[in-house]
Image: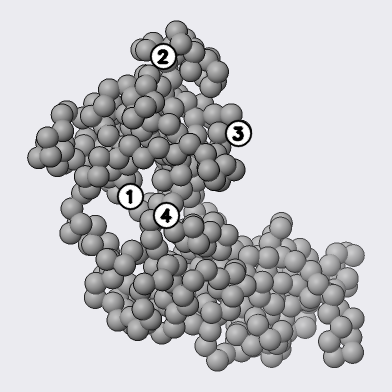
Amino acid sequence: MIKISLFSFKFIFSLFCFSFLNTNLFAENSTNHLKTIIFGAGCFWSVEKKFQESYGVVNVESGYADGKNIKPVYKEIIKRENRFNPNNFAEVVRVTYNSNQTDLESLVKIFFEMHDPTQINRQGNDIGVQYRSLILTNTIEEINISEKVKNNYQNLLSKKGYGQITTDIKKNTNFYLAEDYHQDYLVKNPNGYCPDNSTGIIFSKESKNLAHNKDLISGKKILILDAEGCPYCFKLRKEVLSSYKGSIELFFRKSNELDDLDLQTPTWATPTIYFLENGKEISAHQGYLSKDKFYELLGKFKLGKTEAFNVAFNQGTDPTYCKEYELFKNTPEGLFVDKLSGAPLFDTKYRFNSKTGWLSFTEAVEDSVTEHMDYSYGMVRVEVRSKSSGIHLGHVFNDGPNGKPRYCINATVLEFVPNLDT
């Protein structure tokens, strides 16, 4: 039996609590919160584009599903003899989403609003069984949620004179990725075919405005003012925010979804980035901004006038044996992550005591840092920066144990995430 002293237990437990309160265990960094659902709503190019622009969606892949006895490739499913073949595959998209940011019900609502689900084996001018309306789930519970949304949408359609919804909802049995040229088709072909077959009937605006603003009025939060069809909003999501995993939660809202928030910066420009504390604007930026600029603004918001900000953005250096070093030098197994972006940087299995008063590692997490020559203070050194946020981390030297490097890293710009499997 392994015996743990009371002091050791309290120390480990306090570290766990510290991590939970300050990093929320970095749930967004866990694949446990990534889920998938498959939708067919006509030509998969336009369906892919719509979901790529939806909050909480991590990835969208075009493909073929719900068919048999036919080779799942484009040239086969579009053949004349397969146009009304009940065994033909449907053009679909597989949507991977973060269940901490959105839910299945919200995605199913987007699905119904983007096309006319009363049409049979067609959407607009696209005619054939491969264009059928389809939802393929992973569980019975997901079927029930989808059926509930379908029934609610049927009520809205019936009031406007539409017929019965033809959408088939069932568990997925097969999915095949479409050819490479179909993936991100409208990104590669901005003027490509992108039909809008929506009915114009949407779910209650009132229900959409219950967009969990209660989550925005406590603590520090990041709010992105977004808009449909805004190219710079999409660019900001893709180039700057898609990899963000920081401990300050990120939310997207449209201009009619800002109830109960105290904002001073006008809401006519999209994107606009608001940094909020208890629902009140602390700072904001209108328009697109680069990744470096985003993290500089986030650094001012999260770190303020602290040693950590000085290290991160002014190439400062922690005092030796600072309190963060003392806290982090003997943690349980886990990862040290970028204090702003949340990206993993260093694993405890490569940590060692260099007796210098700074955290030391023999290697960094693969592809997590960049190295730059530093000639400051009349010295020749190699600076280490976080690849995700660009912040200064420290320096790397060639005097580590057993001929390995020594990454000499400032503890104030790190956060610790324990390995819960140990």
**Which residue occupies the foreground of this view, 110 or 243?**
110
Q: Which mark is residue 381?
A: none
Proximity of marks 1 and 3: CB atoms separated by less than 8 Å = no
Q: Secondary structure at mark 3?
A: helix
Q: Quadrant of residue 251?
A: bottom left
Real-space CA distance between mark 1 and mark 4, rounded to the nearest whole angstrom: 22 Å
Q: Is residue 353 visible?
A: no
Horizontal and vertical percent position of residue 360: 74, 73
**In the picture provided, is 144 more to the left or to the right than 304?**
left
Q: Residues within 10 Å of mark 2 (few under 14, many from 20)?
A: some
Q: Which residue is mark 3?
A: 181
User: Rounded to the nearest whole Å, what is the CA distance between mark 4 and mark 3?
Assistant: 23 Å
- Residue 229 badge: 4
Res 318 quadrant in image: bottom right
- The residue type indicated by label 2 comes to Arg
Q: Earlier in the sequence, mark 1 or mark 4?
A: 1
